[in-house]
Image (cartoon, rainbow, N blue to C red):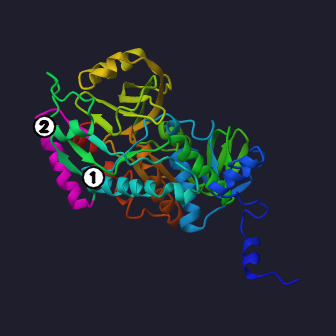
Amino acid sequence: MRLNKKFINYLKLPHIGITHMRRYSAFAIAREAARYHTGWERAWRSPEPKKKYDVIIVGAGGHGLATAFYLGKNFGITNVAIIEKGWLGGGNTGRNTTIIRSNYLQDPSAALYEKARSLYETMSQDLNYNVMFSPRGVIMLAQTEHEVRGYQRTAHANALQGVKTEFIGPERVKELVPIINIDGPRYPVLGGLWQERGGTGRHDAVAWGYARACSDMGMDIIQKCEVTGVRQEGGKVTGVDTTKGPIDCDKLGLVVAGNSGDLANMAGFRLPMESVALQALVSEPIKPCMDVVVMANTVHGYMSQSDKGEMVIGGGTDGFNNYTQRGSFHHVEETVRALVETFPMVSRLKMLRQWGGIVDVTGDRSPVIGKTPLGNCFINAGWGTGGFKAIPGGGWATAELIAKGEPGPLSAEFGMERFIEGRFIDESVAAGVAH
């Protein structure tokens, strides 16, 4: 029997023997409904680790999974393991407030986040998984004259960058958000930076969609597997030690958010960042009353309404270094108190639940995507509180970095060497807040 060329090429793939996952569709739902949903398969495989991979990604959160996905999609590298010490998407990816925007002042930031925002628009189709991207729009309120000038400056910068935003007056803000109080005595609304094509997405679905696509390409997602050491020889990485045994690799990507410093120490270098907790909460579900995202940087609070009706509320990071993933009363009280004047209805709501996540923050509040002092070891870290919105763009840039060994256009400015050379990408000064 003669084998056709397409089948021969398939035999050469590293995922030989793996059955490709069925596509999700309306027809699939109807078919499964007819047989009482007994035919659904697991969304991704849970294999035991192999002895060696071309690339190991440490961290099965959004950025780690996106990096693996674009390694396969853009560069054909599929002999990849994504190692996670906990469960997939159980870190910051599942603990954030899901805001997606790209209205940054600095050119490198705007390019990276706009790439991410544009990828979010087609992500459900690209992954064959509904990530519930909702381009409902994002308003960043100007509640001081300083913020008015700052956001007008950002709007002009965005116009030059090709990022569509506009500065709007208080009447337009009130039209978009009827429940807002624009005449607050301490924090009146003087306008806002409006990005109509920003919005939100379903954080868990983003992780699950990427995981399903990676598994379908033959990549191994290994959960409950903690890295305990990074092995090296001749100044280059050779593999990692884990709770499931040693695993060799040619290249290593560290994508673990708040735990980046610990992994860097294992690899023998230090990072210019620190870890702090970021907290958030949701209210009891109520009827739809707000269909945009509002960020109030003066009082440092932001709010949107979820599809389930909960008011999703977040604020700033803790003022001290820590690794806790719990909420605390004083921070919730501070954030909600700040929002009550701008959104009086918040005072009448009950809190449903609260939580925390560990974020890694750099001095200029911009991420690090680049090479490390250890050869063939690369890092994606330092996103602070803005990691979720950047997942597809960060994964795209990190995949290019790992595949080529050198940074591409998106990540060229984000290497660690900028802190030695004084080339800061200072978004904390530009936005007045580390988002």
Give the amino acid at mark 1. Answer: Arg
Res. 372 visible in picture: no
Q: Residue at x 74, y 53 (%)?
A: 50
Give the amino acid at mark 2. Answer: His
Residue placed under numbered mark 2 in the picture? 146
Would residue 183 be counted in the magenta stretch?
A: no
Residue 423 is marked as 1
Q: Residue at x 21, y 58 (%)?
A: 159
Q: Position of residue 430 (x, y in %)?
A: 22, 44
The quarter holding residue 294 reads top left
Q: Residues within 10 Å of mark 2 (few under 14, many from 20)?
A: few
Q: Position of residue 22 (x, y in %)?
A: 70, 57
In which quadrant will I find the N terminus? bottom right
Q: Position of residue 92 (x, y in %)?
A: 49, 37
Q: Position of residue 61 (x, y in %)?
A: 55, 43
Residues in magenta, as a range: 140-162
